[in-house]
Structure formats: C-alpha cells, structure tokens
Amino acid sequence: MELIQAVIGAIIAWIVPKLLDHLLAKGKQESGAGTDLVSAFPWTRWCVAHTIAGGVGGFLSGVLGLIGLNTPGGVGNWSVFGVAIGIAQWIVLKRYNNFGPFWAVASALGWSVWSIFQAAQAPGYLGWSAVGFAVGILQWVVLRRERNRAYFWVPANVIAWLVAGTLGFAIGMGLLSAQAPFSTAWVVGWSAVGLFGSIILGWSLRHMPNKEVKPST
C-alpha cells in the first residue's frame, strides 16, 4: 500500500505539469527561458507559490488521513505535500529553465521518504533532514544540466526543510496554544513550512547562474 501511494503521487506529479505545459503553451513563447536568476530572481512568485502549495499540500494530506487513506508512516500524506511543492516550484522555474515534469516527481518521491522516519518514530530533525537530502539529490540530477553550482541544491534543501519544518511546527503549535481551530493551525503551519523553505531555496537558486545563455530567436 505504501509503495502504491508513493507511485500514485509520482504519477500525479508527472501528469499535472504535462497538462499545465499544454495549457500554458501560449505563454511559454513570452517566458524568460534562459534568464539568469542571479539578476532577476522572481522572489514574489517563488515565495507565494511555496506558501500556497504548503497550505494546499497540508490540507490535502490532512484530508487523506481523515478519510482513512493514511498508512503507517503516512507515505501518501507526505507524497501529496511533495507533489504540491514540486508543482509550485516547476510552475515558477519553467519560465527560466526547461526542467520538465521530473522536477515535481523528484519532490514527490523525496518527500515520501519522511514516512520511513515517521513509522520508526524517529526524531523530527532526522525526518526533515532526510527529506531535504532526498529531494536535493533527485532534483540535482535535473538542475546540474541547467545551472552552475547545482551541488549547492542538496545542502540547501537539507537546511531549508529542517529550518522550515521546525518553524512551521512551532507556529502550528503556537496557534493551537492560542485556542485556534486545529484545521487553521494545521494549514497555517504547513503554509509557513512552504514560505520559510522558499526563502532558503530561493537564496540558493539565486547563486546558481545559467551554464550558458541561450540566444533569443
């Protein structure tokens, strides 16, 4: 069951960008493909996309649990969150590089790693760090073809999700302590995870110039 959920998450992460690519094909001609993120990083789109994706991913993962589709470790829940974050990143970055849908797939698979640590009741910092490492390695395979210093992406993900996860959890618990509804604390906490993660990852990407400037035609 756990493997099936992880595979389903990866398939969704592959299909959605493909569909969006066709829907947004007209805008692709006006995109900034090849633009150097060092000088023109889309901070607003990047951070907003992560914040929304964090909230949506958290909400959907919570729904899976409520309807009884969660498994030991919650691989489906974590995979859904990874799908949301991966697709959000892809939507923003497709304007600058041709990463393809595997970028989102890598996020879905990487985030599903959390379930192993959750099932083993390991400390949270190990789970967050492992997710960052897994996502970083899988996305580095794509990033290294387009960007210099792509090796920074692995440690950046480890730090980003460790810090973001810790802060997001603290915010969620703080809201619960303030008598906020659980659903509100849950979604806001996960939105915060997306936001804080985006800041660290954005800083990292901003220091990865294109390998080559593609001539305009």
Image (tube, rainbow, N blue to C red):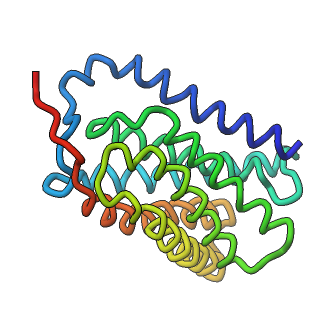
Residue at position x 74%, y 47% in the image: 63
Quarter of the figure that contains the C terminus: top left
| Residue 54 image position (x, y, % from top left) | 53, 55
Residue at position x 30%, y 38% in the image: 97
Q: Horizontal placement of 15 versus 216: left or right? A: right
Residue 195: name its quadrant: bottom left
Residue at position x 43%, y 68% in the image: 156
Residue at position x 19%, y 36% in the image: 32
Quarter of the figure that contains the N terminus: top right
| Residue 199 image position (x, y, % from top left) | 36, 66
In this rendering, the count of numbered labels is 0
| Residue 118 image position (x, y, % from top left) | 79, 67
Of 139 and 52, the residue lying toward us: 139
| Residue 95 image position (x, y, % from top left) | 28, 36
Of 16 and 145, the residue lying toward us: 145
Q: Horizontal placement of 39 versus 119: left or right? A: left
**Considering only vertical position in the picture, is 95 above or below 126?**
above
**Considering only vertical position in the picture, is 11 above or below 74?**
above
Q: Horizontal placement of 114 versus 128: left or right? A: right
